[in-house]
Image: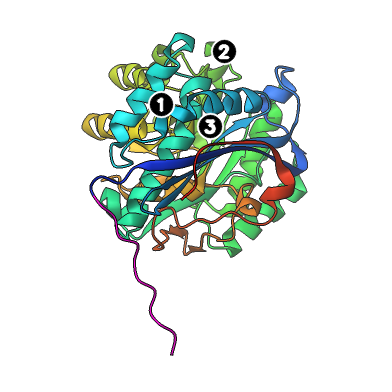
Amino acid sequence: MLAQQQPIKSSDDDRIAWVRVSSVILPLANPISDAKVLTGRQKPMTEIAILFAEIETIDGHRGLGFSYSKRAGGPGQFAHAQEIAPALIGENPSDIAKLWTKLCWAGASVGRSGLSTQAIGAFDVALWDLKAKRANLSLARLLGAQRDSVRCYNTSGGFLHTPLDQLMKNTDFSREKGIGGIKLKVGQPDCAIDIQRVSTVRKHLGDHFPLMVDANQQWDRPTAQRMCRQFEAYNLIWIEEPLDCYDAEGHAALAVQFDTPIATGEMLTSVAEHAEFIKLRGADFLMPDAPRVGGITPYLKVAAMAEQAGLMLAPHFAMELHVHLAAAYPTEPWVEHFEWLEPLFNERLETRDGRMLVPTRPGLGLTLSEQVGPWTAQEAEVGIRP
């Protein structure tokens, strides 16, 4: 009989001994286009830069965290993370809020939002992963889970580069997988094409299957008014980013005027930016992104403000992380289903009856796959591995 593995002991004085940061370039199977491509502001997306942080303590506890950048920014995130990583060595890993502040001020001259805090996000997620593993709890349980599964919707099958016939097949595939909603990208230069695609998919799904649309910030205020009015007829769960992500007043005006909820927030990169949106009630559904806002520590502040304001929540992308965070939100949230990051990990999330099951493995419940090695562009270590 095999001897039962003993849990790693930990003292209150455990210290961070070793940190590794890695820049991993994840290739996408097909070039991805949304409205920002059709308006000429961006090129089709062919890869995602992932910033991984691995942390190990003197007592042998380990944590894994990540942040990411689409298109440009990956090398910058890695460079900033490499520069501030030494500040973690010798610190107590339980002091997560203190360490976030320390890392933030280490690079405060380049700002307390955007690329600099997104680099911090990888370390912050790793520290929360470590803390949950040390407690032998999933991250959701550590945070105080409200539910064991979360409503989920698919986005990856609804991009603008997808022909309409393939779009219909993608919606069927998502439903067969147990995914509970479909989101379509809109924002075509010819608005009639958007209306045709949404109308066709709504008819295909039926009147009541959850359907969302996302304009990716590409409408001006008059166009947003007209399109929101047109889309009222389709019983949508929300209309996402109809305006520039910093136009809180414009989003708030749409939220007041139309029955269809307005969703936004994924591009905001600080607690302060979210606070302004919440103050002006610029969203019915707030869509914070933990890696973009700087990790779990600031994300929890955003979620607390959203709860106090009575907002609904739908965290953006990175379902492997956000399924845990959404499970801890008091009112029923949505999680975005993107399979793009799956090749990075050995584990897979399960979907069933319209919902995503919250993993019960300790921490995030993730381990890196063998494919990460060949995709690693840069890596750096500080400290001495126990």
**Residue 185 rendering spot, x and y as whole percentages:** 63, 35
Element under disc 3:
helix
Name the kind of residue labelled 2 in the image: Asp
Residue 247 vs residue 146, the one in the foreground: 146
Which residues are the magenta region? Answer: 1-11
Q: Taking 369 as reference, is 108 left or right? A: left
- Please name the predominant secondary structure of the magenta segment in the image: loop
| Residue 31, quarter of the rendered image | top right
> In the figure, 110 relative to 140: above or below?
above
**Residue 214 rendering spot, x and y as whole percentages:** 56, 32
| Disc 1/disc 2 C-alpha distance (Å) | 16 Å
> In the figure, 217 relative to 34: above or below?
above
Label 3 vs 1, first from the N-terminus:
3
For the residues carrying marks 1 and 2, which lies nearer the camera in this image?
Answer: 2
Identify residue for label 3.
231
Crowd around label 2: few <14 · some 14–19 · many ≥20 (10 Å): few
Is residue 6 found inside the magenta-colored segment of the image? yes
> In the figure, 117 relative to 161: above or below?
above
| Residue 200, quarter of the rendered image | top right
For the residues carrying marks 3 and 2, which lies nearer the camera in this image?
Answer: 2
Name the residue: 42% across, 18% down. Answer: 106
Residue 87 visible in rendering = yes
Is residue 303 found inside the magenta-colored segment of the image? no
Label 1 vs 2, first from the N-terminus:
2
Element under disc 1:
loop
Identify residue for label 2.
220
| Disc 3/disc 1 C-alpha distance (Å) | 10 Å
Name the kind of residue labelled 3 in the image: Phe
| Disc 3/disc 2 C-alpha distance (Å) | 16 Å
Q: Taking 27 as reference, is 61 left or right? A: left
